[in-house]
Image: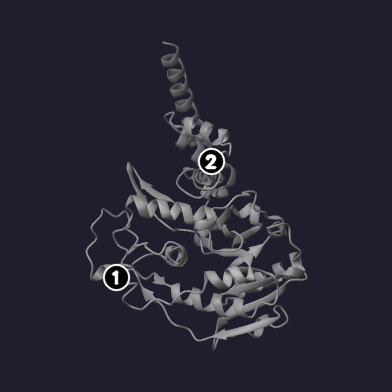
Amino acid sequence: MKQISSKDLSVVIQGAVNPCETIPCLKSIRKYLPEAQIILSTWKNSDVSSYEGLYDVLVLNNDPGAVIFEINGQKVNNLNRILISSRNGIEKAERKYVLRMRSDLVFKNDNVLKLFDDFKIRNTKSSLFKQRIFAYDIFSIKYVSFRKLKQPLLFHVSDWCYLGLRDDLLEFFNIPAVQEPDFSRYFEFHKKNEYDLYPSRLWKMSPEQYFTYSNALKVFKDLKFENYLDVYDENTRISEDFVINNFRVFAPEQWGIYTLKKQYKGTVMRSKNIFEYYSEQEQKKDYKKYCDDSFEIKDVVFWEKLYKIKYFEQLRKHFVLLLFGSPKKKPIELVSTFLYFCKFLFSLCVEVLCLKK
């Protein structure tokens, strides 16, 4: 994808509307993407009087509802809501490219127009779309870890926003709705055969996984991914292969798009292990593995060596949070960064001495 103009872009805002979030969202699009077509895709009986003049097309959908997916929890699975409001909104798009995003995101600049795919090669056998779809890095996850435990999350590409050709996004959302409550209460009736870092979750898989897996199934016909714990080696390979050939993941500052949700404002993917989510480095590794074996990844090898040195991961985490995390926590992060820097420096000295011996 080359740099595009806002006149070539339809922006689909999907989901429930809230004046405190949706009005800033729509106004920011008008400010930074002045020639874009704006489509607001929400629910029938929603009060949309506050948004008149801020969109070009209004789509009012029947709300399919949502089901609680946690044991004794209140979190609901909005999968069918996301699917229906996104698909119906994209169908109304009249431009070559479509940006589909949540109604609680806001633009800070026009960086989205400057995003481009610098991975030039794709494996045609693993590619579904005409071009790679661009995705957000928050919750584009490969693994989750807790202490010494590590759990793969296959096909987990963030659903916060997507940018791509209109035809590609129509294809992406050309999948069936899930049957409820069977999908969201799946592990109420099935035993978890693997240790799970999310023991309270009952759903078959997350919306992110369902969307990506359902599209991978169009290419890998023999794929059998029954639920999010179905993480054997072949499924892991297919997940990596499909994602790198069909998606390019970028950080919020590259998008120029940020969340207005309080519970997510402190989420900084860069503070995590860069090999556990779809960071630039992890994407490069997969690109070399599945697309172009001649691709140079010397910088990735350097990061891998650093991560092997004791305390580096903790040092990097606290340093990133010091730079980009909550202002209230900066004093704590400053102390933590200093302490882990000392520990890391000591470990590095020990490592160097051992090498010399």
Q: Position of residue 306 (x, y in %)?
A: 49, 31
Furthest residue in direction front, as rendered: 125
Q: Mark 1 sits on what residue?
A: 186
Q: Nearer the viewer, residue 296 or 4?
A: 296
Which residue type carries mark 1? Tyr
Mark 2 is on which residue type?
Asp
- Numbered tag placed on residue 122 in the rendering: none
- Between 298 and 303, the one lying in front of the other is 298
Query: What SS does tag 1 mark?
Result: helix
Nearest to the observer: residue 105 or residue 340: 105
Q: Which residue is mark 2?
A: 293
Question: Dividing the image into 4 quarters, which one contains the C terminus?
Answer: top left
Secondary structure at numbered mark 2: loop
Q: How is the image coloured?
A: one colour
Tell me the quarter of the picture where residue 210 sits: bottom left
Q: Residue at x 36, y 52 (%)?
A: 234
Of the residues under marks 1 and 2, which one precedes in the sequence? 1
Residue at horizontal 61%, vertical 79%?
91
| Disc 1 packing (10 Å; few <14; some 14–19; many ≥20) | some
Q: Around disc 2, counting alpha carbons within 10 Å, would you say few (fewer than 14), some (14 to 19), or many (20 or more)?
A: few
Q: Nearer the viewer, mark 1 or mark 2?
A: 2
Asked whether, in this view, residue 263 is left or right of residue 164, the answer is left
Up/down of 280 relative to 71, above or below: above
Tell me the CA gap for discs 1 and 2.
40 Å
The image position of residue 62, as x and y in percent, is 50, 86
Image position, residue 49 (x, y; %) = 65, 86
- Quadrant in which the N terminus is drawn: bottom right
Q: Are the residues tagged 1 and 2 within 8 Å (C-beta)? A: no
**Residue 140 visible in this rendered orientation of the protein:** no
The residue shown at (57%, 34%) is: 299
- Res 248 visible: yes
Is 85 positioned to the left or the right of 6 in the image? left
